[in-house]
Image (spheres, grey):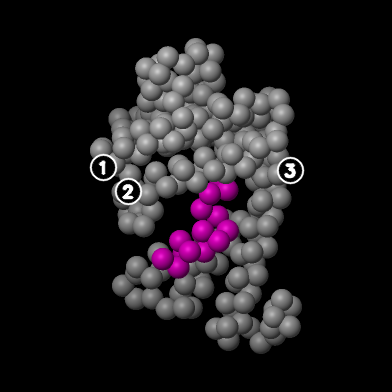
Amino acid sequence: MNTYEQMFRYVKDYLVKTGCDEASGTNAYHFRKRSEHIWRVFLWAKRLTDGENGIHTEAVLTAAIFHDIGYALLPEGMQHAENSAILCERYLAESSCDRAFTDLVTYLVKNHSRKNLMQAAGTPLELILLMEADLLDETGALSIVWDCMAEGAAETSSFEKAYRHILNYSCKGMSVNPMVTEKAKAFWEKKQRLVAMFVEHLSYDLGLMDTPPASII
C-alpha cells in the first residue's frame, strides 16, 4: 500500500496532466485548485477520525484523497463521484490492495456527494466522516478569503461589495449546521462564530452599524 503522500501525488499529477486541476465554467476561480481542496479534505478527515473507535480510518483517508479525481474525466451522463470511484478502484487494484478494502473505499468515494445520506439511518460512519470533511473545507475563514478574492477579481470592487459577498455566501452557507458527529458539529460551530464576529467587525468598520460589536468594547 502506497503512502497517503504518494497517493495524493498520483491524484494531483492526474488532475494536472488532464488539465482539470483548475475548475472550469462560469463560476470557476483561478485561485482554486482541486488538488488543494483534496488535500485539505484529507486533513479534515484526519482530524475527524483521530480517536474515533470502530471505524476503518485508512479507508476514510484513502477515500478523501481520491474523492474528486473524477473531475479529470467526465463522460456524458456520469457524475464526478462515479468517475472518481472508477479511477480509485483502478489505482488500488494496481497497488494490489485487499478486495474488501478496495470495495469499501470505492463505495465511500462513489457516494460522497450524496449528502442526504448524512442524516439517513444505516449510513456507515466512514461515509459520514468523509462527507463532513468535504463540507468543512472552504468554510469559515477560508470561505471569507474566497469571497474577498472573488470580489477583488471583479471588474469593479469595493470593501462594501466584499462585505455583501460574504453575507451572501460565507454567512448563508453556514446558517445551518449539517454535521452529524459531535467533533464535526463543534468545528462547524466555531466556524459559525468566527464568520459572525468577522461580519460584525467589518460592518462596524464600514460604518454600516452604529453600535460596536461586544467583542470590541
Q: Position of residue 179 (x, y in %)?
A: 66, 44
SS at circle 1:
loop
Q: Does residue 153 sit above or below 182 in this rendering?
A: below
User: Disc 1 marks which residue?
Assistant: 19
Mark 1 in CB contact with mark 2 (< 8 angstroms): yes
Residue 62: say if magenta: no
**Alpha carbon distance from label 3 to label 2:** 33 Å
Closest to the observer: 89 or 78? Answer: 89
Magenta part, dominant SS: helix
Residue numbers of the magenta segment: 135-149
Identify the residue under disc 3: 182
User: The residue under label 1 is which amino acid type?
Assistant: Gly
C-alpha span from label 1 to label 2 = 7 Å
Res. 67 in view: no
Q: Residue furthest top?
A: 99
Q: Is residue 88 left or right of residue 19?
A: right
Q: Secondary structure at mark 3?
A: helix
Residue 146 visible in the displayed image: yes
Left or right: residue 108 versus residue 149 is right
